[in-house]
Amino acid sequence: MPKRRRRTRSKQQSKVGFSPGSLVYTGFAEPTDHPITVISYAPDEIIDTSFDDADSVYQHVQSQPKRKHWVRFTGLHQTDRIQRMGDRLGVDPLVLEDVVNTNSRPKHEHFDGYDFIVCKLLIAPNDKDAPSFPIQFDIEQLSMILLDNVLITFQESPGVSFKTITNRIRLESGRHRQFGVDYLAYSIIDTTVDHYMYSLELLGDQIQDTEIKLLDQYDPSLRRLIHDTSMEVIQLRKHIMPFREALWSIYRAEDGRISNDVKPYIRDVYDHMNSAMETLEYTRDMVVRLSETYMSTLTLRMNEIIKLLTIISTIFIPLTFIVGVYGMNFDPAISKWNMPELLWPYGYLFAWALMIVITLGMIGYIKRRKWM
């Protein structure tokens, strides 16, 4: 199995020295060229096409003004095509800069003629029934430019294919055929939030499994697992919290491209985001509790070790005393009080019997006091 890509930060250093509005891709996705796919649909038909250049896409969209179009750019490293498409549509260069800058904060901005939305996609492991631990989520940027009848999406890789949305568009009786592209934008946002909930669910399962393992048996390797889980929670919180603010901005915008018919759906997904935030806060509390449990288990284990060593030392103290006494160089021939036990025929056996009786007596006393 290939090693999964792990991202912790974007390559911001590659942007140093460039003027504002310069398109410099700062992500880590593989530089694979993908065609620009366009789904054009109307209430009674749907057309799937793909193009290799932005000019062909623009001409295709302009030639069919009565249809709704979903233009999908996959591969943010192809900055020349993104720049060309932005120029043809009159998109602000600073917006295009945010599109290819994968460190952009999730947000919503309204411009004259279009809305700009940025969010983060969480790509979780596919094996939900038996996920690999520790769970690591790939975080990719998704940007949307929403026009009157065109929705343009930009994503780093085809990791999230939105197949369910594509299948719903193909349904002639579906809402996508009846509503505008703002409903399509809502569907993408709703799917993104569903990925958040799924990711938090996986993370919660990992925390519970880790806690059970920790309570059953102390394992030093769990410390790294707890640390990795904590870092995942921090990353999720970093990307989920700003997106909730962006959703509220989309819902409250009076002159945006989201119609009043679609705003109730935006409000619904905003409620889902609130639930995701509550789950995230609960997950963060679980991680804190897990860390405290680990430290308590570590302290308890140390106490048990110290307790065992103390008991062993306590048992051997009187034995050491006896051995020390009989190990002194006294001569019983000088006086009868000068350690006469050295002349006893069974002195050696007596010393052993005395030490065994003392040992058993101390063990019995320790058990009665429930010290072991």
Image: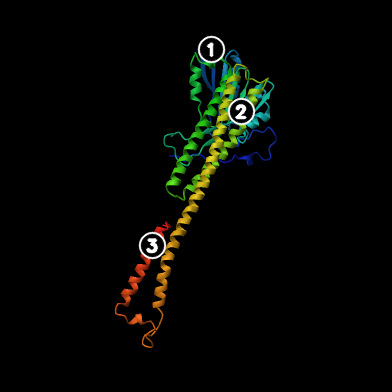
- Whether residue 208 is visible, yes or no, is yes
Q: Which quadrant of the figure has residue 236?
A: top right
- Residue at x 38% of width, y 81% of height: 339
Question: Horizontal and vertical percent for residue 176?
Answer: 54, 17
Q: Amino acid at mark 3?
A: Ile
- Position in image of residue 170 (x %, y %): 49, 17
**Display colour scheme:** rainbow
Q: Secondary structure at mark 3?
A: helix
Circle 2 is placed at which residue position? 82
User: Type of residue at label 2?
Assistant: Ile
The first of marks 3 and 2 along the sequence is: 2
* Three-letter amino acid code at the position of disc 1: Pro
Which of pointers 2 and 1 indicates the residue nearer the eye? 1
Instruction: Please name the residue shown 55% across and 40% down the image.
Output: 285
Mark with earlier residue (3, 1)? 1
Examine the image and state in which quarter residue 26 appears: top right
Look at the image and tell me in which quarter the N terminus lies: top left
Between marks 3 and 1, how big is the CA–CA gap? 87 Å
Identify which residue is drawn at 41% across, 75% down: 324
Q: Earlier in the sequence, mark 2 or mark 1?
A: 1
